[in-house]
Image: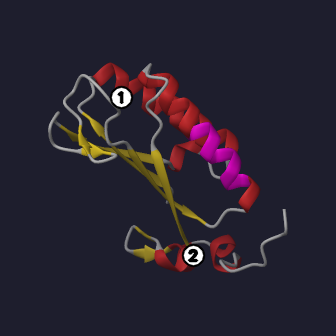
Amino acid sequence: MPCLEITAPKLDIETKKTLSGRLTEVFDRDTKFGGEIFGIHYNEYEAGSASSGGEMWDGETGRPYLHLLLYIPRLQRSEKQKLAVSLTDTFTECMGKPDWKPVIHICEHPYDNVVVDGKLLSDSYESCAKSEFYYKLPNE
C-alpha cells in the first residue's frame, strides 16, 4: 500500500506526531487512496552525518539533507503535481523552517508489485486486478 519514507535530522516525538498526522491528511485529501492505508517511516540521522549541496550539516546552519520517498500506485500527472506541492508545503510548515524543502521521489508501481498478507494485491482485490498500470499520459 502507499507509504512514505522520510529521511531527516533527528526529530522529537511531538514533531513526528504532528508531521505524521498532517502528511496523512494531505495524502488522504489529494489522492484516491484513504489515509488509513498510508504508512510513514522515519530514517533519522545525527548532525554531521549527512550533507546537502556539498556541505555537511552541522545541526545549526544551512539546510540539512531532506528526502521523502513515496511508494504509490500510478497517479495521473496532475495528481502528482498537486501532491508534490502539498507534501512539500506541509513538511516545511510542520518543521517550522521555511528553507527546509525536501527532495521527493515518487516511486510508482502496479498492484502486481505489492504484497499484503502474503498475497499480491492484484490477487486479493478484483478492483486492483483490473487496474492498469500503464496508460497514456495526457498532454497537460
Element carrying mark 2: loop
Q: Report which quarter residue 126 is drawn in.
A: bottom right
The amino acid beneath tag 2 is Pro
In the figure, 54 relative to 10: above or below? below
Q: Earlier in the sequence, mark 2 or mark 1?
A: 1
In the figure, 95 relative to 34: above or below? above
In the figure, 124 relative to 25: above or below? below
- Looking at the image, which residue is at 61% across and 46% down? 84
- The residue most toward the right is 139
The amino acid beneath tag 1 is Lys
Image coordinates of residue 90 in percent, x first then y, are 55, 30
Q: Report which quarter residue 59 is drawn in.
A: top left
Residue 80 can be seen in this image: yes
Query: Dot 1 corresponds to which residue?
Result: 16
Query: Dot 2 corresponds to which residue?
Result: 110
- Looking at the image, which residue is at 23% across and 35% down? 57
In this rendering, would 29 be left or right of 106?
right
Quadrant including the C terminus:
bottom right
- Looking at the image, which residue is at 42% across and 24% down? 95
Image coordinates of residue 40 in percent, x first then y, are 40, 45
In the figure, 84 relative to 75: above or below? above
Front residue of 12/7: it is: 7
Q: Which residues are magenta?
A: 79-87
Front residue of 106/38: it is: 106
